[in-house]
Image: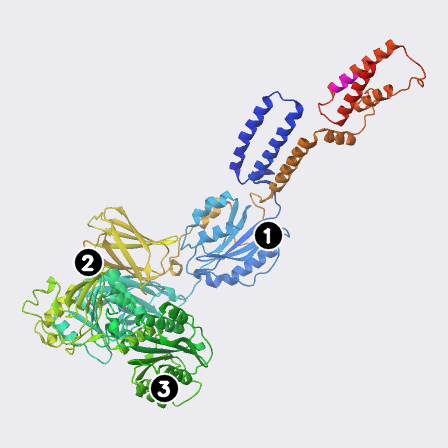
Amino acid sequence: MGIEFEEVLWLLLLIPLGFVLFLFAKQGIDRKRKIIPILRGCTMGMLILALANPSIVLPEKAKPVIFLADRSASVSLQEDRILDFLNRSVHSKNERDQYGIVSFGENAAIEHTVSDERNDPEQLAGEIKEGNTNLQEGLEFSSNLLPRGGRIIAMTDGKETMGAGEDVIPLLKGKKIEVDWVPLTSDTKEDVAITEVSAPSIQYEGEETTLTVNTYSTTKKEIEMRLTLNDQLIIKKNHQVQEGNNEFQFKHVVGESGLLVYKAEVFSKGDGSPENNTLYHLARSEGAAKVLLVENAGEESALTPLLNSAGFTVDVYKPEQLPDKVTSYLQYQTILFDNVAATSIPEEKMLLMEKSVKEFGRGFIMFGGSDSFALGGYFKTPIERLLPVDMDVKGKKELPSLGLVIVLDRSGSMDGQKLSLAKEAAARTVSLLRDKDTLGVIAFDDKPWDIVKTKPLTDRKKAEEKIRSISPGGGTEIYSSLQQAYGSLLNLPLKRKHIILLTDGQSASSGSYQALVEDGHEKQITLSTVAIGEGADRGLLNNLSQWGKGRFYDVTDASVIPSILTRETVITTRTYIEDQPFYPRVASSDWSALFKDGVPQMNAYIATSLKGTARMELESGKNDPVLATWRYGLGRSFAFTSDTSGKWTGDFAQWQGWPAFLNELVTRSFPDIRSNPFSIDVEEENENTRLKLSSSEGNVSPLEVAVLSEDGKMIPATIRIKAPGDYEVVFEERLSPGLYNMNISKKGKEGGSFQTGFSVPYSKEYSFKGGYQSLDTIVEETGGRKTSSVKGAFRELHSPSFKKQSIQTMLITAGFLLFFCEIFIRRFGVAPIKLVFDLIKPPKTSPEVKEKTSIEQLGRKVKKEHRYDEGKRPDRQPASEVAKEKKESVKEVNREKKKEAPVVNDDDDRLKRLLDARKRREK
């Protein structure tokens, strides 16, 4: 038994309190005046003790036990054994003993709260990430459930792949917690794992290189090995593996330059852990520059033969073939868009290209045409962000009057991403229109709803808010909605009228669509349609666009919807194309040598606006950009607003310097990337991932790093210098297994950048080497046992647990009582308190002790003696004797007064008055 204080520092206040009381006691103050400060000091002392939150510590007979169950992947087949051990242990406990159940993997979760109830657990259902074994997390979580000591029984194979269990030992010893270990055997699955992939870090185009793949197998069996290079399959072979370690070597001729990403995969029947079937290796190949060219479907770009003849390696893609990994774009020095519409490129792929330019220094060039820039729907897209020009034009006030009605499907099937993107697209359209342009928005389910009434646009913000407030509804009624849209535009005095219909379903009713649309076209109303998803009536929507002389869009990726509406709005104005022949003016000295003999004539270009920090290199007679450039992040982008086919470029494309112009333009967009001078080692530490960068050059310059995952997500990282030539990159969290791309550059953007990457392997949880073992040390240090028996689960603890009983409330109550006592005494004095004690004090029966006469009794005696009548007095005493008796009475009264406490009350006043009266009579 003892006492503990949770807030010990409050006790320091007792020192000044005691000092003040000591000084007060040294003063010669009578007894009555000392009572008040003593009571006040005791009150303050009680409150100070209460602030320290004291508790009485009492021993506890019950034994608290936490069962810690491993549910990581390495013991995923051992759950039945764990449950059996739990059930048998629970039935062996005493009635007072308490237990709880915690499961853990990468994280920890409670399965059964601490109590003395005997409930048989049927399953372990906590949400656990099984990819790692974090014993440290499990022990810390369990110790929080044992604030007064107890026992933790860990049921695990002991292979730690995350955290450090030994770091918890001081905490466990401080709380007097014992740790027992019930060993589990790791699952014996039939499994084949790739343990290592290696190849030369620097390779050369055209050389033959050797790839080495190491595997580990639990049994002898047949496997299929696949090797890919930059997502292209290069080797596929069947092999026989033996039990244990196996090594395979493959020959391969390097046919490309740039970053090389090798991926090794193994497949076999009955594989128990597919998580360990893949590993990556990164290398770099020196060779010719590579260019990614994107051209329109059904068209062949005129750039391909010109670039090939200039010595570039050109890979041609259609929009729908574009890769969805950032690594695929980093293989190229620059990306070219030749008259490609944004409506065929999902926004996620645009984001990957933007990050390739901004974070990894890749180049980007957009060439013009009827499907490019604003006409291609690039307004407010990631591609517009990286270009040196804005899609919007400065002269919107000169555009012809426009009436636009958007008919938007809000049926239940549109709920989610489709409706969200459609609303964003409609709101984006508002910002493209001029003031006084006419806009209407109709949303339909089983009937049409006017969201924005068809009238001149006066309040853009209010219109956008109404559009974004559209919510999903019921069915799909197209005909009446389309009919309402035509009716709203029919009699308006506008030069151009256009309707855009978006839907993912089929109309619930039929009508004469052809008559409706053709009648509208006769009144100068055009119609474009957008089919979203597989459920849309593509046949009807395609026919509607043909009858309405508009365009039909078949959308499989909803992220292109904003680009479609943007493009439709821009095309309807028909004023972005400047088609008056002109001679471009050279605005940059970088091109002076090429155009020393003059600049050929051009026929047309797309109007754009130069961004603030961009540089004009060629401009039209109207001061619009024909060629513009700027630096975007680490990369450089160019905008050439005419086409490459010769239709718009005219004499410029027939000019003999045209190939040299293209060659220099592409070359200027290339990044300044050097071969990576750093070696990279990946380390997994507790809660985060670290990279060690080592360079033989002994650099001490501060560096910057940009790290992207395969899907283009930016990974926050910090880099610091450890020693000359040695750097450490620290990530905020532990990275998931997979491939990561990294760009290393010197601060200040001097000296170029170094593009590289690294691979985070699968967790050691799936490795046959297992993880670190620390449980033996933990068991020994905490005084536990390594056992498989249930008998000792609830045995006596080396350090019995205890319970605490707080006395804070009692101290506060006592302090308030003393405070009220002080108030009572200050108001009424101590006589009432003394009287109460006299009444409850037992009478003294000893004959030797004489009863003292109180002042009150003496007063009554004096009163009685002097309240007499001379005529009735039985015996008269002489005057001298009477005087002597009076003197004796007065002396006795004075002696009694000195014995009594000096408290002034009504009895004292009355006695004084009696004595005064007696003196007057004597006189």
Main secondary structure of the magenta stretch: helix
Of pointers 2 and 3, the one earlier in the residue sequence: 3
- In which quarter of the view is residue 53 placed? top right
Distance between mark 2 and mark 3 Cα atoms: 56 Å
Disc 2 residue crowd, few under 14, some 14–19, many 20+, Cα 10 Å: some
56 is higher (above) or lower (below) than 851 = below
Q: Is residue 896 within the magenta segment?
A: yes
Position of 580 compared to 883: left or right? left
Image quarter of residue 613 = bottom left
Residue 540 badge: 3
| Magenta stretch holds residue 643 | no
Give the residue type that dot 2 points to: Ser
Q: Are the residues at dot 2 and dot 1 in contact (C-beta closer than 8 Å)?
A: no
Q: Mark 2 points at which residue?
A: 675
Bin the neighbour count of mark 3 within 10 Å (Cα to Cα): few under 14, some 14-19, many 20 and up: some
Of discs 2 and 3, which sits in the foreground?
3
Query: Which amino acid type corresponds to the residue marked 1 in the rendered image?
Result: Gln
Mark 2 / mark 1, whichever is N-terminal: 1
Instruction: Tell me the magenta residue range.
Output: 892-897
Label 1: element kind: strand
Q: Which of the pair 617/873 is nearer the observer?
A: 873
Q: Earlier in the sequence, mark 3 or mark 1?
A: 1
The x, y position of residue 93, in whole percent, is 61, 53
